Image (cartoon, rainbow, N blue to C red):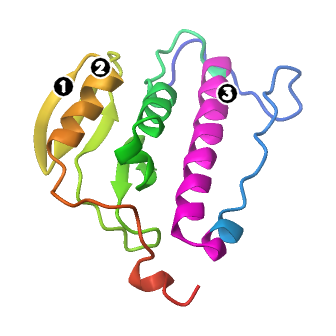
Amino acid sequence: MIPDDFRPIGRDHPDFPPLPERVDLNAAHLLGPAAAVEAKWEQMARSWRWYAEYAVLRSPSRVYPRIVELVAAARAVPELRRLYPYTSHMILKFSSTTTIPYEVRLPSVEPLADGRFRVRHGRVLGECDGPGEALALVLAHAPPGLGPAVRGEAGRGR
């Protein structure tokens, strides 16, 4: 359903937010898993900040899920910052590998429209009021010895 205050806004609109500077993920992957992880965190932070700004511009009354806040909070957690982050349908996931197929060994976090966060790992583990609480729940379900992300089988030749 399209909100009542939806406005089609293209790049020629004076309020169109400037596109974020591009992060070269391919170059980062060539430098190794640690560089790929850091580049992906930066790319996600920039992209979601821009998308949130654009979404609010297009539909000011619509509540935008707290994905920007979630990505920033997750990036600040050392155990999570070492993993390769990605989103699917605005759900934040953490991979132990930097290439597809991703190896997901931790729960994922979904920012909800009501401002809360749902943590799930096959089943719902809980709903939390803030990103810190949700990320603590993610870490509580971390397998022992979860180390930094490594190249996946598909990326071994890089």
Left or right relative to 45: residue 96: left
Q: Which mark is residue 54?
A: 3
Q: Is residue 49 above or below residue 93?
A: above
* Residue at which label 2 appears: 116
Q: Which residues are magenta?
A: 29-57
x and y percentages locating residue 150 in the rendered image: 42, 71
First in sequence: mark 1 or mark 3? 3
The CA distance from mark 2 to mark 3 is 21 Å
Circle nearer the N terminus (1, 2): 2
Which mark is drawn over residue 127?
A: 1
Q: CA distance from mark 1 to mark 2?
A: 7 Å
| Residue at (39% x, 61% y) in the render | 148
34 inside magenta stretch: yes
Q: Where does the image place residue 79, in percent across and percent down from the top left?
A: 35, 46
- In the rendered image, the quadrant that contains the N terminus is top left
Residue drawn at (35%, 16%), measured in percent from left and top?
115
Q: Is residue 89 in view?
A: no
Q: Is residue 56 magenta?
A: yes
